Image (cartoon, grey):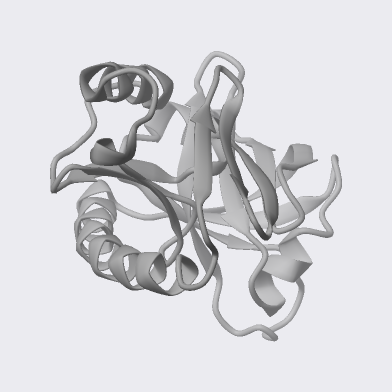
Amino acid sequence: MYQTVKVAETSTISPQYRRIVIQSPEMAQASQPGQFMMLKAWEGTVPFLMRPISINDADPAAGTVSFLYKVVGEGTALMAKLQKGDSLLLGAVLLAAGLLYLGLGIFYHRLTAWRSHQIQLKDVGEVTVTLDDAGVREQGRKGEGFYPYASFIGCFHSRGRYFLFLDKKHAVILPEAAMAVGDPAALGARLAEKFGGPIPEV
């Protein structure tokens, strides 16, 4: 199922991350957790493949679907140039396929996050991570970073650590044993509130 839709809104989350909202009452009604959609924001066959982007949010009442994505290549760079009122081609993926993609992604996330954790923490010294109502803030010797909760594509818990994924290869990792203020149970409850439900154990 493919259709040409209009861009209702675009916004910049951070230098690398963008959010796009499209107007599509049919897609908004049909959207389910675990689905992703194929997006194409250019004419012709270069790039050849549409880009699979997971659904960030859907509002059936407003008839909109939003996507959060990282600008990492030619296709997403073209998507980042879209403005309100522009058109793009949208294709829905079946729920079963979306769930399979999500399941494989969780397994892949877990492996790559461990690698990213080991690489990113090398020679960075002490890093302080603070959670507040707006998002997650990291501060260390090499500078400060801030991530709104909307910039994360998922959150999982494994072996005493919370993994807040920014994309398939990068996560903010929160070891419960490293908490300086509060208790792990409160951290889990806060993350569940921000991510809209219980945090999956993987």
Identify the residue shown where x is 34% and y is 17%: 182
Q: Position of residue 120 (x, y in %)?
A: 48, 68
**Left or right, residue 183 beside residue 141:** left
Q: Position of residue 167 (x, y in %)?
A: 47, 58
In the image, 92 versus 178, the foreground residue is: 178
Q: Is residue 1 visible?
A: no
Identify the residue shown where x is 26% and y is 67%: 108
**Left or right, residue 172 beside residue 34:** right
Identify the residue shown where x is 29% and y is 52%: 94
**Left or right, residue 133 beside residue 21:** left
**Left or right, residue 182 beside residue 90:** left
Classify 142 as above or below 159: below
Classify 71 as above or below 43: above
Identify the residue shown where x is 24% and y is 39%: 177
In the image, 154 versus 40, the foreground residue is: 154
Q: Position of residue 78 (x, y in %)?
A: 77, 68
In the image, 12 versus 30, the foreground residue is: 12
Q: Is residue 8 visible?
A: yes
Quadrant of the image containing the N terminus: bottom left
Q: How many marks?
A: 0
In the image, 60 versus 178, the foreground residue is: 178
Picture quadrant where residue 100 is located: bottom left
Classify 162 as above or below 126: above
Q: Position of residue 147 (x, y in %)?
A: 60, 40
Classify 89 as above or below 153: below
